[in-house]
Image: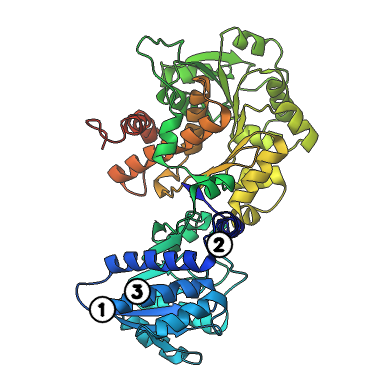
Amino acid sequence: MYLATADEMRRLERAAAEEAGISELVLMENAGAGAARIARSLLPAGRSRVTVFAGPGNNGGDALVLARHLAGEGHGLTAFLVGGRSRGIARQNLVAAAGSGVQIIGEGASGQFSEAAAGADLVVDGLLGTGLEGAPRGPIAEAIAAVRACGRPVLALDVPSGLQSDTGQIPGVAVRATVTATFGLAKPGLYLYPGAEAAGIVQVVDISLPGPVLEGWRPATRLLSPDLARAMLPSRPPWGHKGTFGHVIVLGGSEGMTGAPILAGLAALRAGAGLVTVAVPSPLDRTVVAAAPELMTAAVGSDGQWPSDSRGWLDRLLDRGPTAMVLGPGMGLSAGLADLVTSVLGRFPLPVVVDADALNALARLDAAQRQACLGQQTVLTPHPGEMARLLDREVSLIQADRMTSAREAARNWRTTVVLKGAGTVVAREDGDAWLDPGGNPALATAGSGDILAGAIGGLLAQGLPGPQAAALGVYLHRAAGDRVRARQGDAGALARDLLGELPAARKALSCSGDCPGTR
């Protein structure tokens, strides 16, 4: 499913008019009629009372179309006009709604907002659409407050009023919807926090945007759905053996942080890689062997320290025939690590996942140095703090626009970037991106990121290109987390709990949920 920014939706609607002859008035009619169908599912049986809050723009026009349809079916409709006189085609729908039995209440009625909302069977939010600029003020803010306090089912049109549709940010106060009926295409802000909480259940209303128009003006973001992830799954031929499915090398670990490369290595196996070698400073390799006999090991350096030069030992690792690398889990922040990371990346000819401490080492390099050592099959997996260091800005700015931050990093370094967190973004260097809709507090546990890095590395080793390996790894990681949460709840899960669920999540995806034991 495509996700459209406000600007992309404006282009699509303009193209629908210019290329297919579908007027803005027809699109508004389709939007309001589709929203009315959703409203019926939220209403009790029999004649119901519906309170509509309509702003002066097109979002208010959509709400007035809905009001007209429901009034024509015998429901009691009251529509408050909030924020000024209806403009443009919204005014045409105001006249039509008044003529169909909708009770229209104009400006100056803010004192009635709370009572009207609390006394309704359904409240419809048509105050503000995708063009929000700044925090709502005046009567519109008062109407939003009344909707928030009403305690009744709320249907938001396109996006909950007060929510920035591109970023999911809420600069002031926003409606909290039971259901959001979004028009034409869903909006990124409905799946990015805190917007995802305000949106409730998201339902997309078909407004008859023609297929050729959609293809010609294809948005740059897609929701990471099961169907998309399923199409990325690498094949598992029955004649395959462990060498068929790739060999991952995990470079990581330091004194006190040996668990990170172990988790990454096991995750690579659980994601389907045939072989994994964990390279750690000597004598930490003994810890790896004791903890996970499925992992091969390589001892590098001595006394638990990484050597400053990768020549020699990296060649020996390459002789083992790896097909991908995961670099960084638990490496620490020792002196010379940035030089080591640069050297390894510059000499390793295969796909690499750069994670954790290796990302912090990259942050010390200038842009030219980073570009020189990052290949197109490199995947960076920063959390917001690491991304802030990579882009040299505050974490709050990263979180304020996660989509743009991920795209900027991918474009700057000509590689794939995974910005982790609730609403993980996978951005490609060409600007296309996937948005994962998950938000799971059970994943907020030490080692969860190491498992994601290992899973992506395991998929790279099986031959997936960097963007697809990153997107599928994010999906499987979140799906495994959802399974852990369903079994154990929001708190107390360990990263190792995810390991056993990765194969189950992959099985459920490959079977479309129809295989025995996948639920």
The tag earlier along the polypeptide, 3 or 1, is 1
Query: Closest to the observer: 168 or 54?
Result: 54
The tag earlier along the polypeptide, 3 or 2, is 3
Query: Residue 69, which numbered label?
Result: 3
What kind of element bears circle 3? helix
Query: Closest to the observer: 267 or 430?
Result: 430
Query: Residue 175, which numbered label?
Result: none
* Residue at the image point whose x is 41% and y is 68% from the top: 32
Which quadrant of the figure has residue 502? top left
Seen in the picture, residue 25 relative to 104 is either above or below; the reply is: above
Q: Quadrant of the C terminus?
A: top left
Position of residue 46 in the picture relative to residue 88 (left or right): left
Quote the CA–CA distance across marks 3 and 2: 32 Å
Q: Mark 2 points at which residue?
A: 169
Position of residue 224 in the picture relative to residue 14 (left or right): left
Query: Closest to the observer: 411 or 193?
Result: 411
Inspect the image, locate mark 3, and give the three-letter code of the amino acid beneath it: His
Inspect the image, locate mark 1, and give the three-letter code of the amino acid beneath it: Ser
The picture places residue 349, in percent across and down from the top left corner, at 66, 17
Q: Residues within 10 Å of mark 1 (few under 14, many from 20)?
A: some
The tag earlier along the polypeptide, 1 or 2, is 1
Which quadrant of the figure has residue 234? top left
Q: Residues within 10 Å of mark 3 (few under 14, many from 20)?
A: many
Q: Mark 1 points at which residue?
A: 48
Inspect the image, locate mark 2, and give the three-letter code of the amino acid beneath it: Gln
Q: How crowded is mark 2: few (under 14 residues within 10 Å), some or many (20 or more)?
A: many
Quote the CA–CA distance across marks 3 and 1: 13 Å
The picture places residue 239, in percent across and down from the top left corner, at 37, 9
The picture places residue 180, in percent across and down from the top left corner, at 41, 63
Q: Do the CB atoms of the residues marked 1 and 2 lie less than 8 Å apart?
A: no
